[in-house]
Amino acid sequence: MSKALPDIIENILMLNGAVTERQEDGGMAIILPQRVARMLNIPEYTTLCFSYNHGHDSAIYASYDSGFFLSVKKLLDLTGRVAFAGFEAKLPGVEKVSAMVAQKIGFDNATLRIDTTEMTEIVYILFFVKYTALSDEKHEGWLPIMVNNINSSVIALHDTEILEGLTEYQGPATISIDTMKRLYDVANRAAPKLVEAEMAGFSKSLERRLNRDIRRVYEYYETLKTQTKDMIAKKTGNNTVDASTNTPIAGEVSEEYVSKLRGKLTAIASEQEWKIRDLVAKYSLRITGETVGAIAIHTQAIQCRITIKRRLASRQFSVTYNPLYRQLDPLSCESCFRETASLVCDDHLHIVCMHCLKPCQQCGKTYCRKCQTSCPKCKKT
Ligand SMILES: [Zn+2]
Ligand SMILES: [Zn+2]
Ligand SMILES: [Zn+2]
């Protein structure tokens, strides 16, 4: 599950020196440093609430649509302030990590060789993406996305306990604005797919309800069509026979009435079509997201430098052991930043996923989406 809003706000406030206490009724008592209180324009000691019908009159409403929420963004403004945190890494030995790399990292169309494995300083940026998924229902949520500055590996953070180990960071900022912007771009490009994956259960339920409603509408109009066709047949005498004599019924042909029925049939068919189109629109899922802040987590990792080889080409790359997750960071696709990729391209040995190294839909040529933004043969994007 993505992290709840009160948890995120609590993390951000704590990283800015606040003391917080959760209350049984869902509120949160906070004591803020003067500087933070002034920035948020609220008292130093106050209570936050996350629903309208919270009992306290004096509590500050802090949900997504609140003024408070907008001002919290100031604490995490990427151009001005990024919250900094430390994390005390407990790392396994380098041999153990080398063995993990040998066992878990591999490519379907290339080989790899481990060159060196050693401890290194690393920065993981935790970007907070606020998303809205809109359909017949509205869902809002947060998705923390973690990207590191060594290999841009992307992870959607589901285990929120990780954040409890964060400590105040007093050291120098070790990440440049350019790197920050690059990682911000990675997080933004990865976010839609990660949010989509987060909403997979909801998408399935939408699909089920859409299919159910389409079936109902379809059957209803098909019955109407059959009834109307029967009436036309009866009036024109076609296709109906008198059972006792087995001869066609002549019918009382009234041209005007029959053409009226035919008109009705056309109207039913077009009504059926737009009712189904309406349902598709009603149940389609529109996802929007916004990265509202970030925490730069300074820690140590184990970095394993590898050489990737395919045919005559080779390329150096780094695999990292993530101390927060206590496992290897996944190899993310260098084109779309999906979490897992296991292919490399011919020209630059980019690490890509199957979607980013697949044949062109128009001409069938296989090409790398990181190397080329459109098909090199037919130019289709
Ligand atoms: Zn990809
Ligand atoms: Zn490529
Ligand atoms: Zn093509």
Image (cartoon, grey):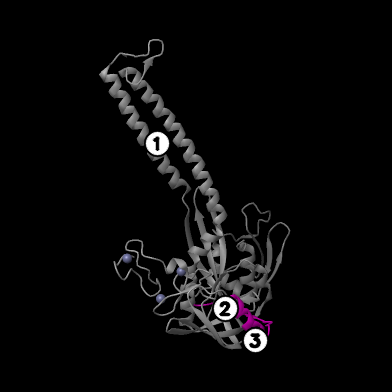
Given contact means CB atoms under 8 Å apart, are the residues at marks 3 and 2 in contact? no
Q: Is residue 86 above or below residue 284?
A: below
- Residue at the right extreme, as displayed: 24
Label for residue 94?
A: 3
Which residue lies under the disc numbered 1?
272
What are the residue bounds of the magenta stretch?
Answer: 80-104
Q: CA distance from mark 3 to mark 2?
A: 20 Å
| Circle on res. 109 | none
In this rendering, which labeled residue sits more in front, label 1 or label 3? 3
Q: Which residue is mark 2?
A: 124
Location of the C terminus by quadrant is bottom left
Q: Residue 291, relative to residue 179: is it above or below?
A: above
Residue type at tag 3: Val
Q: Nearer the viewer, mark 3 or mark 2?
A: 3
Coordinates of residue 201 in the picture (x, y in percent): 57, 54
Picture quadrant where residue 377 is located: bottom left
Q: Amino acid at mark 1?
A: Gln
The residue positioned 46% from the left and 46% from the top of the image is 282
- Tell which circle, 1 or 3, labels the residue nearer the N-terminal end: 3
Question: Where the N terminus falls, by quadrant?
Answer: bottom right
Mark 3 is surrounded, within 10 Å at the Cα level, by few (under 14), some (14 to 19) or many (20 or more) other residues, namely some
The structure residue drawn at horizontal position 52% and vertical position 64%, both measured from the top left corner, is 194
Q: Verify whether residue 328 appears in magenta.
A: no
**Precedes in sequence: disc 1 or disc 2:** 2
Would you say 318 lies left or right of 271 here?
A: right
Q: Nearer the viewer, mark 1 or mark 2?
A: 1
> Which quadrant of the figure has residue 67?
bottom right
